[in-house]
Image (spheres, grey):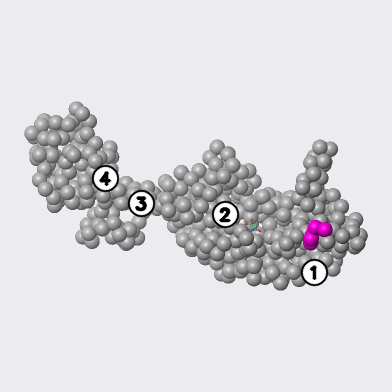
Amino acid sequence: MTVTRFAPSPTGYIHVGNLRTALFNHLIARKSGGTFILRIDDTDPERSKETYVDAIREDLEWLGLTWDRMERQSQRLDRYAEAADRLRGMGRFYEAFETPTELDLKRKKQLNMGKPPVYDRAALALSEDEKAALRAERGDGVWRFKLDHERITWDDGILGDVSIDAASVSDPVLIRADGQVLYTLASVVDDMEMGVTHVVRGNDHVTNTATQIQMIRALGGEPPAFAHHSLLTGPQGESLSKRLGTLSLRDLREAGVEPEALLSLMARLGSSQPVELRMSLDEIADGFDPSQFGSAPTKFDVDDLYPLTARKLHGLELDAVAEDVAALGVPADKAALFWKVTRENITTRKDLAAWWTLFSEGAEPLVDEDDRAFVEQAFEMLGDPPYTDDTWSAWTSAVKEATGRKGKGLFMPLRKAVTGRQRGPEMAELMPLLQVKPGLR
Ligand code: GLU
C-alpha cells in the first residue's frame, strides 16, 4: 500500500515550489490507489498560524489535490518525546550547550583552516558535573543526534544513487533549548508511524534525508523510498526564493490562472515529457513518472501559465462559465452569444469583465487622425441599439456606398472605433451585444 504525504509548515502561503512537492506526492498515491496525507508541520508555535493552515487547505482544494487524512505535528508531541527518550537510551542523543556565537566562531575557524564546518562534538566530552554547571549558567542545552560516521546511501527516485559521508554532516539538533522538537525528528517519527512509503521533496532536503535514514534505522524502522526534485528558478535561472511570495497559489488564482493550467505545467515542467493541457488529475497522473525529472534546477516562467489557461477557457461550454457571466450582469438571453464572442478573446476569466464593460458602456474609441472624419460620418449612419445579426453588414454596406471605402480601409477603422481594439471577435457577432450606441467621445 503506497502512502505519501505533503508536509507544509503553516508559516506562510504555499507557492509554486510547494505545489510541485504536493502534486508529485499526490500523483504517486493516486496512480497506485494509495493514501495521500496532508501533514501540517506546526511544531513551531510562534511561526505557525491557523490562517495559513486554512489557506493551505483552501489552495489544495482549489486544485483538487484532496487528501485522505490530515495530521498535525502539534498534536503528536508525546510521540516525539517518546522517540527522543529512546534515542537517549541508546546513547544516540546528547545535550550540547554552545551558544550560536560560539558555534559561529567554530565554523569560521574550520573554514579558515580549509576544513568543512562540521560540529566538533565537543559536548560529548563533557562530564555530568560540567553539564550541570553549564545548565545552571546557560539553561537547558539543545539535543543533537549522534550520527554514525559511515557512508549513507540510497537509491533516489530522481537523483539515482546518492552517497553521503556522515562525517561531513553536523550531528543534527533535534530539540531546541526551549524544548521545541524540530522537524527532522518529528518527520521521522511521523513517516514511520504513519507508514509513509514514498517521500518526494525538494533537493534542499538531501542532507536531512541522510541523517533521517540513520534516525529511522536507529528507531528500528525501514526508510521509505526517497526522491528529491530540483528547485525552481526564474526564467533566467535566477533564484526564485525572493519572488516566491508573489508566486503563491492564491496570487495565481487571484490573477485568473486556471487550476488545470497550473497542474498541467507543474506535473511535467523539468521532465523529459512535453507540457500539454490536461483537464483532470487522472489525465495528469497518466504517464507521470518521477524518474523522468532531471536533477538540474527547473526554470519556471509564470507567463507559461497563461497560454494554458487560455487554452482551457477556449474549450469550455457556457455552463462552465455561466456563473461568471451572470455575475457581470450579462442578461440571460445574451449569455450564450456573449460567451461565443468572447471565449477566444480572453486569456483569463477576469478578461470577461472588460468585454462586458465594453459592450454595456461602450469602448474608448481608437481612431487614427486620418480616419476621424470617416468614422464620424459612419457613426451618423448607425441607428440606436438593439442591434441584430444583420446590423454590421447593413451598416458597412451603407458606409461603403456613401464613402467609397472598402476592405480593410472600411472595416478596420470601424472595428477600432467600436471596440477600441485592433482585433477581437467577429464584428457581425459582436454588434448585437452592444447595449449603447458607439460613438466618438
Ligand atoms: N515541513 C517540511 C518543509 O516544508 C517538510 C519537508 C518534508 O517533506 O519532509 O520543508
Question: Residues in magenta?
Answer: 137-141
Q: Is residue 214 visible?
A: no
Location of mark 3 (residue): 350
What is the three-letter code of the residue carrying label 2?
Answer: Asn
Question: Mark 4 touching mark 2, by CB under 8 A?
Answer: no
The secondary structure type at the circle numbered 3 is loop
Discs 1/4, front: 1
Chain-order first, disc 1 or disc 2: 2
Q: Is mark 3 within 8 Å of ligand 1?
A: no
Question: For mark 3, does the 10 Å Cα neighbourhood hold few (<14), some (14 to 19), or many (20 or more) residues?
Answer: some
Location of mark 1 (residue): 85
Spatial CA distance of label 4 from label 3 is 17 Å
Spatial CA distance of label 3 from label 1 is 56 Å
Chain-order first, disc 3 or disc 1: 1
Q: Position of residue 126 (x, y in %)?
A: 89, 57
Location of mark 2 (residue): 18
Q: Is residue 163 left or right of residue 194?
A: right
Q: Main secondary structure of the magenta part?
A: loop
What is the three-letter code of the residue carrying label 4?
Answer: Pro
Q: Is mark 2 within 8 Å of ligand 1?
A: yes
Q: Nearest the camera: 360 or 142?
A: 142
Spatial CA distance of label 3 from label 2 is 25 Å
Question: Mark 1 touching mark 4, by CB under 8 A?
Answer: no
Residue at 23%, 43% (x, y): give it.
363
Residue at 57%, 45% (x, y): give it.
242
Question: For mark 1, does the 10 Å Cα neighbourhood hold few (<14), some (14 to 19), or many (20 or more) residues?
Answer: some
